[in-house]
Image: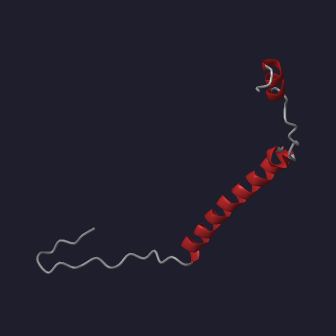
């Protein structure tokens, strides 16, 4: 036989106790750490790219071709 309607509602309305998790990942300290890591990563990659372009990359242009017909030069 089924339980009385009042008894069924009473059992369903009980709240289950859920332990509160450690809120470190929602704290301002965690946000500050992730912000500093992000800014450091972006700035570090920018500095790496700047060093590459200053010291490694060859920025010389190849010589322009000379045309055999006519006396016009490019440039």
Q: State the residue at coordinates (12%, 75%).
A: 70
Residue farthest along the front direction in this orientation: 1
Query: Could you say where residue 4 lies in the image, as x and y percent from the top left?
Result: 80, 20
30 vs 41: above or below: above
**Quarter of the figure with the N terminus:** top right
Q: How many marks?
A: 0
Closest to the observer, 74 or 9: 9
Image colouring: secondary structure
Residue farthest along the left direction in this orientation: 69
The reply, left or right, for residue 26 in relation to residue 52 is right
Residue farthest along the top direction in this orientation: 6
The reply, left or right, for residue 16 in relation to residue 2 is right
The reply, left or right, for residue 40 in relation to residue 60 is right
Query: Could you say where residue 24 lies in the image, as x and y percent from the top left?
Result: 85, 48
Closest to the observer, 13 or 68: 13
10 vs 17: above or below: above
Specify the quadrant of the image occupied by residue 66.
Answer: bottom left
Specify the quadrant of the image occupied by residue 50.
Answer: bottom right
Q: State the residue at coordinates (55%, 78%).
A: 56
The reply, left or right, for residue 70 in relation to residue 1 is left
**Quarter of the figure with the C terminus:** bottom left
Q: State the residue at coordinates (63%, 65%).
A: 45
Specify the quadrant of the image occupied by residue 6.
Answer: top right
Closest to the observer, 46 or 69: 46
Query: Could you say where residue 30 lies in the image, as x and y percent from the top left?
Result: 81, 50
């Amino acid at each position: 036989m089924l339980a009385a309607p009042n008894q069924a509602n009473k059992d369903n309305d009980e709240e289950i106790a859920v332990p509160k998790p450690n809120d470190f990942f929602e704290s301002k300290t965690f946000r500050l750490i992730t912000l500093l890591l992000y800014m450091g990563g972006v700035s570090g990659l920018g500095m790496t790219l700047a060093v590459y372009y200053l010291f490694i990359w060859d920025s010389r242009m190849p010589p322009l071709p000379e045309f055999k017909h006519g006396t016009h030069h490019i440039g």
